[in-house]
């Protein structure tokens, strides 16, 4: 069967001076020049910007970011003399982290988004919109699965994105070049759905690093979500609960005939728990909004958090110092765990100015 050559219908003046994209609409391939640093097109490249938002206008032509140029070369939309896709890819991959950046760019383009570089790694427009005819929706930062997440820098970037009315997204590339997207939000805690009962004053005895309180059933402490029942007459308070209640003035702690101050108990309990100071700061913030934090050990985190009298916890919360650095792989495990048990995953970043709650949530773009 004879298959007609579609190139026979191309104007003779163009037939040998340009390649064409086949099959489909016949668009001339744009010639581009690479000077070792930058890829530019002539004036015929302007259509790439006007129609699909590629590159940035530069004089009479267009300046393409490396990711854009490589993607267009792969799609046979441009031609770069003396370079194939393979050779140009190898050239650009000498730049640190270029491969993962290109993979994210390609994935976003294949999903139908117009993508431009900056101000983080990429800014992504709403589907159907492009530069000059719409606004960007996402600001995307690209990481590998082994990259550290610096909470202080992350918070700064999320605040900057919020000020520009954009959603901040982490695009994480794993060792097999698979992509996962996370939306990052700074959460301001709303008050819980119910108000917890007021507490009376109680005496407690130091037992190890915990405390024992004489509190027959029903106890105001227990009704407010504190302690673990030892027997019908006694309640055991964990170190975090105890410190919080001592600071509030609800518990007077003694050891023998001596009264133990909150500062003294913090020193005692911190001997075996170096994270205690951060945990108590986050715990106190959660309690100030009438949430009920309980140990999150079974979920691999500091707290599982209940809203009012809900039977199941609503949040998993982990306390970190604002300057803390945590591997992305650790955060990924945390988010996966929270998602599997239908809870939100928050990291409480402790700073001198207060607690900043950072939510990580997997999303599909």
Image (cartoon, rainbow, N blue to C red):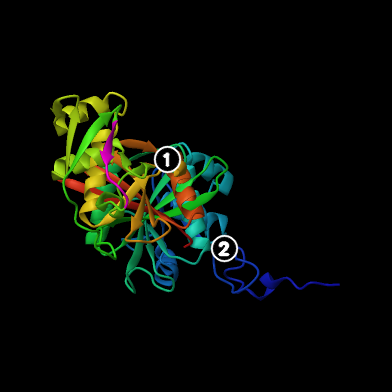
Q: Which residues are magenta?
A: 210-217
What secondary structure prevails in the magenta region? Answer: strand
The residue indicated by pointer 2 is: 18
Which mark is first along the chain, 1 or 2?
2
Residue at mark 1: 297
Residue 231: x %, y % from top left? 38, 41
Query: What element does badge 1 sit on?
Result: helix
Quadrant in the rendering for residue 297: top left
- Would residue 106 be found to the left or right of residue 53 on screen? right
Task: Find numbered disc 2 in the image and state the secondary structure of the residue it sits on.
Answer: loop
How many neighbours does mark 1 have within 10 angstroms: few (below 14), some (14-19), or many (20 or more)? few
Say whether residue 137 is magenta: no
Q: Position of residue 249 (x, y in %)?
A: 13, 43
Q: Nearer the viewer, residue 280 or 100?
A: 280
| Residue 69 visible in the snapshot | no
Residue 265 to residue 132: above or below = above
Residue closer to the observer: 352 or 312: 312
* Residue at horizontal 34 percent and vertical 74 percent from the top: 133
Which quadrant of the view contains residue 37?
top left
Could you say which is closer to the camera, residue 198 or residue 94? 198
Up/down of 261 relative to 5, above or below: above
């Amino acid at each position: 069967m004879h298959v007609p050559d579609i190139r026979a219908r191309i104007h003779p003046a163009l037939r040998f001076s340009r390649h064409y994209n086949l099959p489909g609409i016949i668009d001339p391939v744009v010639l581009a020049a690479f000077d070792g640093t930058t890829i530019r097109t002539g004036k015929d490249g302007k259509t790439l910007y006007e129609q699909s938002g590629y590159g940035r206008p530069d004089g009479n032509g267009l300046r393409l970011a490396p990711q854009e140029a490589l993607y267009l070369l792969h799609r046979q939309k441009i031609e770069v003399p003396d370079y194939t896709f393979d050779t140009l890819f190898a050239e650009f991959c000498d730049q640190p982290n270029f491969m993962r950046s290109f993979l994210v760019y390609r994935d976003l383009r294949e999903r139908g988004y117009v993508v431009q570089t900056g101000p983080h790694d990429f800014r992504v427009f709403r589907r159907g919109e492009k530069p000059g005819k719409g606004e960007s929706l996402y600001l995307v930062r690209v990481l590998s699965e082994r990259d550290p997440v610096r909470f202080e820098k992350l918070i700064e970037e999320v605040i900057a994105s919020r000020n520009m009315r954009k959603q901040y997204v982490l695009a994480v590339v794993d060792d097999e070049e698979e992509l996962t997207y996370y939306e990052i939000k700074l959460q301001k805690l709303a008050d819980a759905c119910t108000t917890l009962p007021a507490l009376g004053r109680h005496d407690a005895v130091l037992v190890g690093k915990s405390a024992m309180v004489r509190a027959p059933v029903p106890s105001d402490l227990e009704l407010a979500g504190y302690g673990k029942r030892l027997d019908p007459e006694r309640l055991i308070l964990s170190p975090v609960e105890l410190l919080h209640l001592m600071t509030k003035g609800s518990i007077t702690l003694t050891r023998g005939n001596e009264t133990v101050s909150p500062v003294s108990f913090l020193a005692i309990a911190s001997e075996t728990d170096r994270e205690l100071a951060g945990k108590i700061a986050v715990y106190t913030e959660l309690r100030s909004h009438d949430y009920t934090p309980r140990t999150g050990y079974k979920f691999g985190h500091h707290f599982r958090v209940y809203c009012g009298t809900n039977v199941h916890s609503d949040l998993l919360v982990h306390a970190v110092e604002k300057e803390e650095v945590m591997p992305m792989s650790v955060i990924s495990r945390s988010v996966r765990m929270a998602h599997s048990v239908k809870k939100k995953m928050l990291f409480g970043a402790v700073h001198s100015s207060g607690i900043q709650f950072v939510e990580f949530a997997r999303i599909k773009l």
